[in-house]
Amino acid sequence: MSRPIRRDQLIVATAFVFVPAAAHAYVDPGSAGFIITSVLGALAAGGYIIRGYWSRLKRRVFHSDRKAVADGDGSDSTDARPEDGSAQG
């Protein structure tokens, strides 16, 4: 039977994961510029995608009623023509 993990063991394990060790490395300005450019490009692409979906949603929700009225598709109309296409009058 295994022993349950105690609270102090969990704290120590978390400290090993989240406390950074010394990294003896060099990051040049070109790398920092690349990272900044990548983040800004990802944000711009995300905004563009959200804008596209938002415009589709607005068009579908807000303009669907206007199109039905403009096309004369109102089913509650009293002067509707007969289905067989025969002219009355």
Image: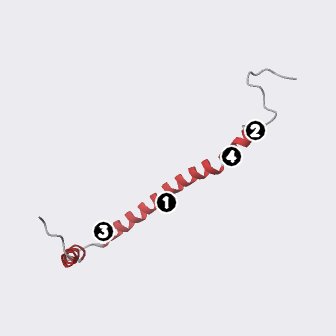
* Occupied quadrant, residue 13: bottom left
Give coordinates of residue 1: x percent, y percent.
11, 64
Q: In this view, does 53 lie to the left or right of 41?
A: right
CA distance for labels 3 and 2: 66 Å
Give the amino acid type for the residue marked by disc 2 in the picture: Asp
Give coordinates of residue 42: x percent, y percent.
41, 61
Q: Could you say which disc has been placed on residue 65 in the image? A: 4
Residue at 13%, 66% in the rendered image: 2
Give the amino acid type for the residue marked by disc 4 in the picture: Asp
Q: In this view, does 42 lie to the left or right of 57?
A: left
CA distance for labels 3 and 1: 24 Å
Please give the residue where the numbered disc 3 appears in the rendered image.
Answer: 31
Please give the residue where the numbered disc 1 appears in the rendered image.
Answer: 47
Please give the residue where the numbered disc 2 appears in the rendered image.
Answer: 76
Closer to the chain start, of discs 2 and 1, is: 1
Badge 4, how many Cα within 10 Å: few under 14, some, many 20+? few
Element marked by disc 2: loop
Give the amino acid type for the residue marked by disc 3 in the picture: Ser
